[in-house]
Image (cartoon, coloured by chain):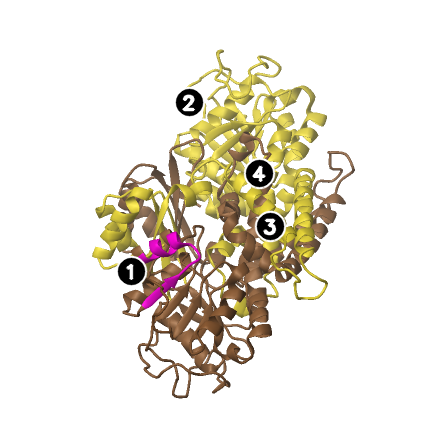
Chain colours: A brown, B yellow
């Protein structure tokens, strides 16, 4: 980071008025002299070390686990930190969230000239704790959230490209100096991420809504399958698979994150609970107490379902990007793909030869058969030419 | 259907002991003489007509809407039914679910020698209604559920290949003759589907669990986004997109299906409600009544989250096929793909040249940027060779 600047760090309390999310109009005070110290040699810490080391930045690593830190060093994420080394200009705390605030506070004390960042997934409790104890040193502290975690964790999954094209949320607090904000922005830009600025409460509410609650909803849906008959599961289609995909995520990765954001998560789950109760009440009033509905298509039941469905349409339509409206915006061509080496490669060679752009793509595996359907999303005008081209080349094409 | 057999239909009350799901050991009584009549010229009816017409079967179409039936006929789904034609050997009722039972009963009366099938998505109310009124004629009635509907509806989306590789659920009732079951099996096989046998209650509970409740859960999650700040939605990642993908489905398509299966759906939603309440209670006890948690990583909150996460793991692991365990079973290689024509085609040509089999694939669009990440799932041993091959060919590869 900061290769474009070469002044020394030492920023507490000055130039604290730069609005978050704007380019700095001032001469910046971010230095490049001195190394970067990363505390916590896991997926994020290791990946950050690799990304910085690749750019020639001197990176040191510290971890409570000697095994983790030497593994990270052997993977090219930096050198093992030792006492007596020059003080770092920047400390990035990438520890588990339940110890992050303490490590940030200790780092601000240990390295009185360094910027200190943390990369935790939940901000309010950590920023509050640091502000409560750090006093003036808090100006050197800025929180960032690289939203690049995956289903796997640990430095073994680390990569210098982990942050490429991913959100990098800058979470400044009221005492963060403009220099610290700029350093956080520069770091994110240098590792290929794109920048978003939120305050701690905004951040925690946002990730509760777009990450934590979807994870819990998916897991709750997955949990309903535990007692399901095998014959029922054989009917599972793309819908169930999509909804439950992240339910396969590692609980060890999520327990601390989700419980650490309990207030924001709980608020949203309570709204979900109210909407769910309304739906159940609507379905209930369409039937008697027995298993047999008196009127399976009662106005009440249809109305309750319609409310949930139309609200779902409206909400999902607000998600930026293509997926939310792929069904309406794009045409689909489904191709039967035997589950054998090379076929999918051949299919995409065919599509490449037809000179048709693929807007989106997903695989849907058939049940009880060793083959799948490749669903290709293209602009509506390309459905017919693509279908004709593929059929001409001998592929079995199913319109959707 | 039934091209392999050539005896005439006329089966009421005989050979009613063939177990569902076994091959017939007896000389079958399914005939091929006489046409097939499809009532309801929508997505399923039209697709079935196309699939049968392609095999040389004489297909007629009837629909309350003259426009729909002539559109279906012009698309090759069959000929428009007129009075005075030879009686059909098979009537397939593909109307909206709220009129299906009445149409089945009328068809059993109108065509006293024909098998009558319906293709509705919910079975208990329809089968019950038919059994209550049809008496002996019910032997000629078998319900089937081709699980091939998509986000779109209407004969305009119909295709002769709609059923290829999809589940075709045979839902016999206690009076269905073995000949009718065999005819339903033959029809499913002839259109390329794979067969599953369930009784009406099993069927409705199964589709509630694997189709209807996931749809509602996705829509409920989508509905939570209606009031979300745009900055929060900009953080949306693959998890939210997966969970809410089917929330974009057309309410008109789902309202009757979901409310028609209200008893089975409600039972599962009530279990969801209990699990959700337990989760909220667990999150609650980790904090005070204010917005600030006293202990964000309280044992209670972590325990409640862990229960939901581990149950989600267990349930999703029971879904057959690859997707449920893709994260653990396969390695992932992520490639930065500019959102420009031909790049994805070129990428798959590269992968084809590397002679590496793609186990699964998904696109993840980056936010605020006109490019995406292509996530390629391969067997673990292929991650390194694929990464090396793609990097050698100039692609920007991010390990996950």
User: Which residues fall within the magenta stretch?
Assistant: A59-73
Rounded to the nearest whole Å, what is the CA distance between mark 2 and mark 4?
A: 40 Å
Q: Position of residue A270 (x, y in %)?
A: 68, 57
Q: Residue at x 65, y 63 (%)?
A: B293
Measured as percent of width and height from the top left, residue A5 is found at 33, 81
Q: Where residue B396 is drawn, which disc sits there?
A: 1
Residue at the location (75% across, 40% down)? A287
Q: Residue at x 38, y 88 (%)?
A: A27
**Between disc 2 and disc 1, whose residue precedes?**
2
The residue marked by circle 3 belongs to what chain?
B
Q: Are marks 2 and 4 on the same chain?
A: no
Label 2, on which residue?
B3
Packing grade of label 2 (10 A; few <14, some 14-19, many >=20) is: some
Q: Are marks 4 and 3 in contact (CB under 8 Å)?
A: no
Task: Say which of B349 and B34 sits in front.
Answer: B349
Q: Looking at the figure, which quarter contains the N terminus of chain A?
A: bottom left
How much space separates mark 4 and mark 3, taking CA atoms?
18 Å
Secondary structure at badge 4 equals loop
Give the spatial CA distance, label 1 vs label 3.
36 Å
* Residue indicated by mark 3: B305
User: In this view of the protein, which residue sits in the foreground, B311 or A104?
Assistant: A104
Q: Is residue B16 left or right of residue B48?
A: right
| Residue that mark 4 sits on | A225
Placement of A122 over or under A254, stated as above or below: below
* Residue B115: % across, % down: 56, 24
Q: Earlier in the sequence, mark 3 or mark 2?
A: 2
């Amino acid at each position: 980071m900061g290769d474009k600047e070469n002044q020394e760090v030492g920023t507490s309390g000055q130039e604290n008025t730069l609005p978050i999310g704007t380019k700095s109009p001032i001469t910046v005070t971010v230095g490049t002299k001195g190394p970067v110290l990363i505390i916590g040699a896991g997926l994020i810490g290791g990946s950050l070390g690799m990304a910085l080391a690749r750019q020639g930045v001197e990176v040191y690593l510290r971890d409570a686990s000697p095994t983790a830190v030497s593994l990270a060093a052997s993977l090219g994420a930096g050198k093992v930190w030792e006492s007596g080394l020059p003080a770092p200009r920047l400390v990035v705390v990438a520890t588990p969230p339940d110890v992050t605030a303490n490590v940030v506070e200790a780092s601000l004390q240990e390295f009185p000239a360094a910027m200190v960042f943390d990369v935790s997934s939940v901000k309010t409790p950590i920023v509050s704790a640091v502000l409560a104890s750090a006093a003036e040193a808090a100006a050197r502290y800025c929180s960032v959230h690289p939203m690049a975690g995956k289903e796997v964790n640990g430095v073994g999954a680390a990569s210098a490209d982990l942050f490429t094209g991913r959100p990098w949320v800058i979470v400044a607090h009221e005492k963060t100096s403009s220099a610290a904000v700029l350093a956080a922005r520069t770091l994110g830009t240098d590792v290929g991420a794109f920048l978003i600025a939120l305050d701690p409460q905004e951040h925690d509410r946002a990730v509760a809504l777009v990450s934590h609650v979807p994870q819990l909803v998916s897991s709750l849906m997955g949990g309903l399958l535990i007692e399901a008959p095998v014959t029922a599961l054989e009917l599972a289609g793309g819908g169930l698979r999509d909804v439950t995909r992240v339910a396969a995520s590692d609980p060890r990765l999520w327990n601390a994150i989700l419980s650490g954001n309990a207030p924001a998560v709980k608020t949203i789950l309570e709204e979900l609970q109210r909407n769910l109760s309304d739906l159940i009440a609507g379905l209930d009033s369409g039937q008697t107490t027995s298993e047999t509905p008196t009127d399976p298509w009662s106005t009440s039941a249809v109305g309750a379902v319609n409310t949930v469905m139309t609200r779902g349409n409206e909400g999902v339509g607000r998600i930026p990007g293509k997926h939310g409206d792929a069904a309406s915006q794009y045409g689909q061509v489904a191709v039967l793909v035997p589950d054998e080496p090379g076929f999918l490669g051949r299919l995409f060679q065919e599509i490449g030869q037809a000179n048709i752009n693929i807007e989106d793509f997903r695989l849907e595996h058939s049940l009880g058969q060793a083959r799948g359907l490749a669903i290709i999303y293209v602009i509506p005008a390309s459905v017919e030419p693509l279908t004709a081209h593929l059929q001409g080349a001998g592929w079995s094409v199913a319109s959707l």
